[in-house]
Image: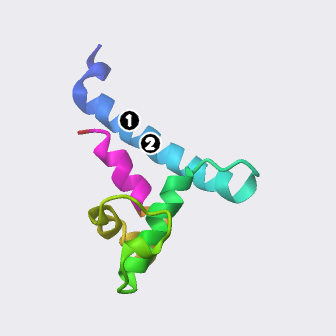
Amino acid sequence: MAWLDIGSLLAFSAIFRVILIVYGEWQDSHMEVRYTDVDYIVFSDAASLVASGYSPYQRTTYRYSPLLAFLLVPNSLLHRSWGKFVFSSAGKI
């Protein structure tokens, strides 16, 4: 069972996570029930405020660490799914 080595399992899990993120983006844009949690939208809004030079706490429902908003600033600059990849990769540690 050489295919069950740690490298193969990590590669499979990374590919599977990317597939789930891509599917989630599709579902969010095509279906009534969203795949993405509401908290992620709050994180992204706060990151957008930080990218514009404002406090993340100007988002009325933001109650998390400001470091999280700074971590997700690329959501505003690169792609709205940046944080999904960050959170997904953090699950492998």
Q: Position of residue 19 (x, y in %)?
A: 51, 45
Residue 89 part of the magenta-drawn span: yes
**59 vs 5: above or below:** below
Amino acid type of the residue tagged 2 in the rendering: Arg
State the residue position of label 2.
17
- Name the main secondary structure of what is drawn in magenta: helix
Q: Position of residue 90 (x, y in %)?
A: 29, 46
Which segment is the magenta one? 83-92
Check residue 13 in the rendering and tell me which mark sits there, or answer none. 1
User: Residue at left 24%, top 23%?
Assistant: 5
Front residue (pair 20, 33): 33
Left or right of 54 in this view: 42: right
Could you tell me which residue is drawn at 30 percent across and 34 percent down? 10
Q: How many marks?
A: 2
* Horizontal side of residue 87 vs 23, given as left or right: left
Q: CA distance from mark 2 to mark 1?
A: 6 Å
Q: Nearer the viewer, residue 39 or 86?
A: 39
- Rendered position, 93 above or below 2: below
Q: Position of residue 49 (x, y in %)?
A: 42, 79
**Image-based side of 80 in relation to 47, left or right:** right
Which residue is situated farthest in the bottom direction here? Answer: 53
Assign a secondary structure to mark 1: helix
Q: Are marks 2 and 1 in contact (CB under 8 Å)?
A: yes
Q: Which mark is drawn over residue 75?
A: none
Q: Residue at x 40, y 71 (%)?
A: 57
Residue under the point 65% across and 55% down: 28
Which quarter of the rendering shows the N terminus? top left
Image-quadrant location for residue 67: bottom left
Residue 23 is situated, as x and y percent measured from the top left of the image, at 59, 48
Q: Is residue 17 visible?
A: yes
Q: Relative to the observer, which residue lies in front, 21 or 76?
A: 76
